[in-house]
Amino acid sequence: MFESLSSPKPDAILAQMAPFKDDPRADKMNLGIGVYMDDKGKTIIPGVVKLAEQLLLDSEESKTYVGLAGNLSYNEAMKEIVFADSAPEGRVYGMQAPGGSGALSVLAKLMERMRPNAKIWLSTPTWPNHAALLSTGNIEIGEYPYFDPETCSVDFPAMAAKLRTMGPDDVVILHGCCHNPTGANLTNEQWDEVAEIVKETGLLPFFDIAYQGFGDGLDEDAYSVRKFASTVDEMLVAVSCSKNFGIYRDRVGCAFAMGANAETASIAYANMQNIARGIYSMPPDHGASVVSIIWNDDALKAQWKSELAVMSNRMTSLRTKLADSFREQSGTNKFDFIGVHRGMFSLLGLTPEQVDKIKKDHGIYMISDSRINVAGVQEANIERLVKAVLAVSA
Ligand code: LMR
């Protein structure tokens, strides 16, 4: 039977990991996959995670099943981190999921149960794995305009005009902050406008928020979700703790459903658990327990916030330095957008051939759409990176 299978296309992001590892060049640069690296190029485990893991190890008495919704105290912590006090009483339920990807997948299946003929709209461009995680059943995938490569910013008039044509059978995927892959984000005023459009048209907002705290701050980055929580009746939110807690391989995420009233919200929650049971049954516990320990201890919570700020400040400062170096070495302000963007990523505007060339000639790895992970840049490499980009795009 296996002869009927053909080989799948390699993953646009993960396919880079092995060739980078095997590249013998000492000065190679990994600007591919979205993991945070420090100035030595290391993805360290945050100190606060190590402390919480030790506490967990010392206190854990059993490995028995936890339950379909995972760790309830983690779910409560995530609600506070993402929604703060914006969640309408009794109308928001969170369920632990295996990473942000697991949350996206469960919520897509929930959506299919609610609106089997829905059409999901993704931003152009979006994270390459969105379509695979969200296409389920009869659900169609469409694209709404988002990024303008000329200005390297959001084409908000085009985006808003497209959203206004949608209705209750449409679901719009919104990156809550730190857009992946473009790094270009909506202003708070633009989020206010999108919330109004969603309210008027009845389309269902579905947030993916995987980089909270990597942009302008934990609360600032949650403006979009919190604004929607206080404006619209229903929404879905998929959250990841991979980046802001640095626990990538532990697969820690949360799926939220906000209903128009307490009854429909609790039915959505029951359906989410029922869907999870039919896929992976229950989520892994370790990382979620670590997050819950951190969030429920004032000292650990403060330490987490300060370690998170170190990561985001480093990325913001690298952005400024990169933009300055590009201005200096190119004699133009063409790359100023890097300093304006927020989060891990920016698209440099290179062609796939130029991306191949920079890898071959300079050992610099980025995604074929020219997405760079800013955190992969080391201060000492800025000039070399800028020179290489200008050389291949000349
Ligand atoms: C990325 O965009 O690089 C990350 O979200 C990692 C992944 O799974 O693609």
Image (cartoon, rainbow, N blue to C red):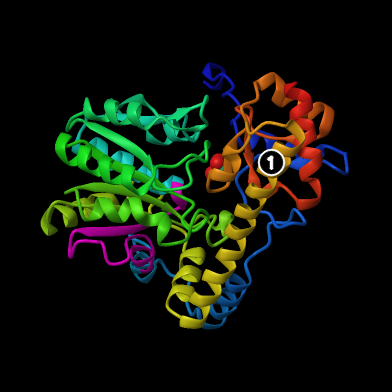
Q: Residues within 10 Å of mark 1 (few under 14, many from 20)?
A: many
Foreground residue, 221 or 27?
Answer: 221
Q: In the drawing, does residue 280 fall left or right of residue 321?
A: left
Q: Which quadrant is home to the C terminus?
A: top right
Residue 358, image x, y percentages? 77, 28
* Quarter where residue 312 is shown: bottom right
Q: Is residue 68 above or below residue 383?
A: below
Q: In the drawing, does residue 128 fall left or right of residue 156?
A: right
Residue 55, image x, y percentages? 55, 80
Magenta stretch contains residue 332: no
Foreground residue, 135 or 219?
Answer: 219
Q: Is residue 381 above or below residue 348?
A: below
Residue 278, image x, y percentages? 33, 46
Foreground residue, 317 or 214?
Answer: 317
Q: Which residues are magenta?
A: 77-100
Q: How many marks?
A: 1
Q: Quadrant of ligand 1?
A: top right
Q: Residue at x 57, y 42 (%)?
A: 345
Q: Please name the residue that numbered disc 1 is placed on.
A: 31
Q: Report if residue 279 is visible in the image.
A: no
The kind of residue on which mark 1 rests is Leu
* Quarter where residue 246 is shown: bottom right
Is the distance from the Cβ of mark 1 to the nearest ligand 1 atom less than 8 Å?
no
